[in-house]
Amino acid sequence: MKWRHFFLGAGAGFAAAYLWKIRSGKNFFGAEKALRKAKAALQKDGKITGSWIVSIPEVLASETENAAVYRGGITQIRGGKPVTYEFLADAKTGDLLKLEEIDP
């Protein structure tokens, strides 16, 4: 066996593995970045006193597609009272998909 054939085969294997990784959709937006993005969206409405996020994406199934999302929450002071929100953020882009106020 010639070394040239070995290196060509190894290079093709690495290239295929890299393309597979990109195409498989496993490249997620970081959970902490998604939380910062959600906090920035609410920051203008009042002081944020607490927040949390689940760092492992979960699958949100709908009739048309399945999407990987992060689930989290934010507590904010509005009108002198704490208001708690729960949100879903797209795991690939970090964009807020759903923001819902939780009743105390």
Image (cartoon, grey):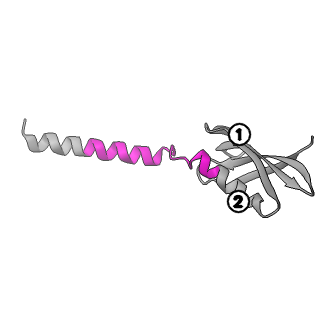
Q: Residues within 10 Å of mark 2 (few under 14, many from 20)?
A: few
Q: Residues within 10 Å of mark 1 (few under 14, many from 20)?
A: few
**For residue 49, side relative to residue 68 (left or right):** right
Q: Are marks 2 and 1 in contact (CB under 8 Å)?
A: no
Q: Position of residue 44 (x, y in %)?
A: 78, 64
On the rendered image, what quadrant is the N terminus found in?
A: top left
Please give the residue where the numbered disc 2 appears in the rendered image: 40
**For residue 51, side relative to residue 102 (left or right):** left
**Residue 62: quarter of image:** top right
Q: Position of residue 104 (x, y in %)?
A: 92, 40
- Tell which circle, 2 or 1, labels the residue nearer the N-terminal end: 2
Q: Position of residue 39 (x, y in %)?
A: 72, 55
Q: Main secondary structure of the magenta part?
A: helix
**For residue 27, side relative to residue 49 (left or right):** left
Give 98 or 43, whichever is nearer the viewer.
Answer: 43
- Amino acid type, callout 2: Ala
Q: Residue at x 25, y 45 (%)?
A: 12
Q: Residue at x 23, y 45 (%)?
A: 11
Magenta range = 12-34
Please give the residue where the numbered disc 1 appears in the rendered image: 61
SS at circle 2: helix
**From the viewer's perspective, is the residue at label 2 or at label 1 nearer?**
2
SS at circle 1: strand
Q: Residue at x 85, y 53 (%)?
A: 77
**Residue 51: quarter of image:** top right
Query: Residue 95: in sight, yes or no?
Result: no
Q: Residue at x 10, y 45 (%)?
A: 4
